[in-house]
Amino acid sequence: MRKQFALLLPLLLLAVPALAETFPLDMELGYRWTSIDGNEDVYRSQINEEEGFLLRNFNYYGTDTSGEAKLVDTFRITASDLGSGPSSMLRIDAGRAEIYKFRFNYQRMEAYNALPAFANPLLGQGIIPGQHTMDRTRNLFDAEVEFLPGKPISFQLGYAQNNYEGPGTSTYFVGQDEFRVAEDVDDSEQEMRAGLSLNYARLWGNITQGWRSYSGDNTLTLLPGAGAGNNGGTILGQPVTASGIALTGKTEGDTPFTNLYLSGRPIDRLTLTGSYVMSSAESDFEGSETTTGSFVGFDIGRFFGGLNQGASTNVENDMWRGRLRAEFVLAEGIDLIAGYQTESRDQDGAALIETLFTNTVSFGGVNFGDLQQIVSSANAIERDEDVADIGVQLSRLGPFSVRATYSQTNQDITATPDVSEIVIDEPYGGQGGNFERTIDTFDLGASFVMAGFTLSAQYRDDSADDAVFRTDYLDRTRSRVRAAYATKGGMFRASGLVENTDAENLENGVGYDGSMDVYAANFELAPVKMLRLWASYAQHDAASVVSMRIPQSLTMTVSDEVEEGESTEAGFSLMFKPVSFDLAYGTFENEGSLPLEMNRLSGRVKLNLRNGAGIAAEYAYDEYDETTTNLSDYTAARYGIYLTLTR
Amino acid sequence: MRPTVFLGVALLLLIGLPSSIVASPPESAEAQPTASCSDCHEQAGAFINNPHARGKMDQGQVPNAVCESCHGSGTAHMDAGGDTTMIKGLKGAQGADACLSCHARPDGKTTHRGSAHANTAEVNCKSCHVIHSTNGTSYKLLVKPATELCGTCHLGAAASFRDKPYSHRLGRGGMECSTCHDPHARAGKDNIRETRSGEVICLSCHADKRGPFAYEHGARVQGDCTSCHEAHGSNYPKQLKRSNVLQLCSECHSPTGATYGSQPPSFHSTGTARYQNCTSCHTAIHGSNRSPALLK
């Protein structure tokens, strides 16, 4: 990113004088320093703001005021956090009314993950971070140009790219042990699309035909010093070690897709909309593996000295979804809405996996030489879902408005796994079969607004006749009440929210019972124009129990999950011309399955100079503390100085 | 073309446009022959930077027709010396009707009139948009930065993003609530966006999880990413729904009755650390092309 930033910075600075003369411009540019104590990996996994130059904001809008522009009558550029990461954005819009519209989006996201406890069987030995880490970057580009926007017929051409690459570490299970491996990923997805829009009289529509291609390379290599695996000792007297592991895999995929909608208003009061989307994805994979060492294979009943594997797969996934919707204005302020949606997904997978186990020896010591194993598998998934709904909205009942909706969802899923996928068969297996589920949903909402006071309530009830997953509900209710008050002119604002969700599936020994409660409140007071005080409070409580079976004994136990999170934040903004101050402090404390505490302090002082220019200094301090262990704890200070320009 | 080069070339081309192609305001605008809204309403003159005036500017002036497109004819209002009863005010849900006269064209999921965020006194167009904004840099004419705006009512979701240690990074770097939610769609599942090919919106960034894979995780068959991950904020790594992996996996992988999810074989002795960390071996948990058990 620093190379890109070095390129962007002078370009944007060159552009400023030309841009700033007449039209709105907002820019903030500076340098950020960081100081991390404690576990920097956790800091980077959570916050990941790094040291370096940073274009915090760049917003500019230019428009033609003469009505005589020939090529461009509107131009907007928006950028944020370009530079020292972790995520940044650049968006450019330009166009000429009714001639063309151009849009360009760029996003960059850095994905860093190196945590002590996630999937880390060696945590008890104090080995951190875990063996699953990544330091990768995702770059997204999307450009689209529309010709004749707003005209009866318009056209669009678009191109998008999504690149994801970088190193990481993972584990590979082979021969009854897990080995730490380097995992390099290099994925690229490209999408081209062309569209045609209709905007004629009372008829609107669009059809977009797209082609998406995906190419992914994945490489696993045994890390130096990792040959002993995670588990010491021997199995059946045999040491399990790896002297070499190398896996490569390449995936190529193509997905043509069609997306269309057509909407019309045959009479003033009635709007009809139909839409359809379909995609037909095909993916081909070729992989190879060369692994050497000393291994135990219970699946082949032998010791072996390595394996050479080739895998070749082909998967086809066809999906389509259609929607119809009618909106009818029965009378002013009374809207009736009805809709129907149906979707279908069919997937067929085929794999040929040829494995040559080398130097195999029976557990009794008989040398059998090499053993070839061939898995030729085919599986299928069919999933259909229909949703029908009807609703009414009353929006002109004086200070009241009311909304009510009923919907029914029907799901039909058939999974046909290959025999190679089935680990344990009935009655403990559940990797295939036909599953049907019907959900009835009632959704009610009402609001009251008067003299700056708002009170609204929503209630939703979902009732299902069966569960597909064990954690699917049979009954679920959601309720939400919000109250808000604001004085005219905004001197005082307050709002509060209470939400509750209860879900349960108590049949067939599942014993699933979950609830989530949220309480939140915000206050804001501006006693004088130069001062704004604010505070907020939020409480997140979640509790869930569900039975689960212990694999080694097949006996049932209870999975018990509890979260009790509470946050309090407060701050103020003071404008004492030409200086402004902002200060905020927040604390979040969670009790339950993973007790933790976070404290955050941030401050900003800005000195406004002449002609919209200014200089700002910022400080942010984060403290993360897991109560039961200090392996993840860190404190992070970031401070920076920024030049600002606002016109 | 390398992304860096592409970005640089695109910027080079585009930064020159405003000064060279977009015409600047004339030195002295010619007076309009009739009374102008901006004679009395300062904001009408400043409407120059509002997208509603785009393509309609006349000699550096905002024509009355731009104002009249929403407020109705201003002639009687002017003749009556500015009588406010003679012009259409646009307040609350009634005000939304004026917006909907142009912005009510529904597409596949978007339906401005029937959405949960329109057309009522509690939430209507003006709750989120400043129609008279004269700051063209305000994207979509929002009254506040998008994340802050949604958090005005959705206090719980906003706090979840703000407070919890693992969450999508909102407000900076391009991701907003509206990246995943369509504020103009109907309430419920409809307001969750889809990719252009109709899939769950998560895949528009996480394309490497899209597949299709020869061996899929069942969670993709019936559920979606939110079967295991919290889409908003989470207290747990990877935005998971449970603090430890064994618990997360076992809740489904303990078949009782006719539910979907296989039972792990008995050699998974969950009393040991090795078997408490399922994804230590089942690394290809999002789907695999070479391991039926999602081991690689």
Image (cartoon, rainbow, N blue to C red):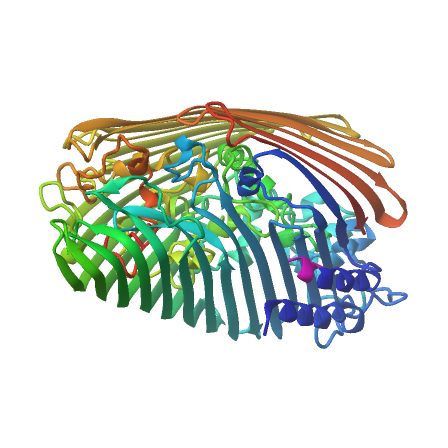
A439 is within the stretch colored magenta: no
Residue found at x 60% / y 49%: A86
Observer-nearest of A389 and A414:
A414
Question: Residue shown at 85%/41% (left/top)?
Answer: A608
Residue at image point 36% right, 55% down: A243
Number of labels in the image equals 0
Q: Quadrant of the N terminus of chain A?
A: bottom right
Query: In front here: B295 or B61?
Result: B295
Q: Residue at x 39, y 33 (%)?
A: B243
**Magenta-drawn stretch contains A4:** yes
In the rendered view, would you say A530 is above or below A134? above
A426 left or right of A310 in image = left
Counting from the top left corner in percent of width and height, residue A438 is at 20, 44
> Horizontally, is A234 left or right of A404 in the view?
left
Give the residues drawn in magenta, as a range: A1-5
Q: Where, by quadrant of the figure, is residue A313 drawn?
A: bottom left
Residue A293: x percent and y percent?
Answer: 30, 55
- Where is A20 relative to A431, above or below? below
- Residue A93 image-quadrant placement: bottom right
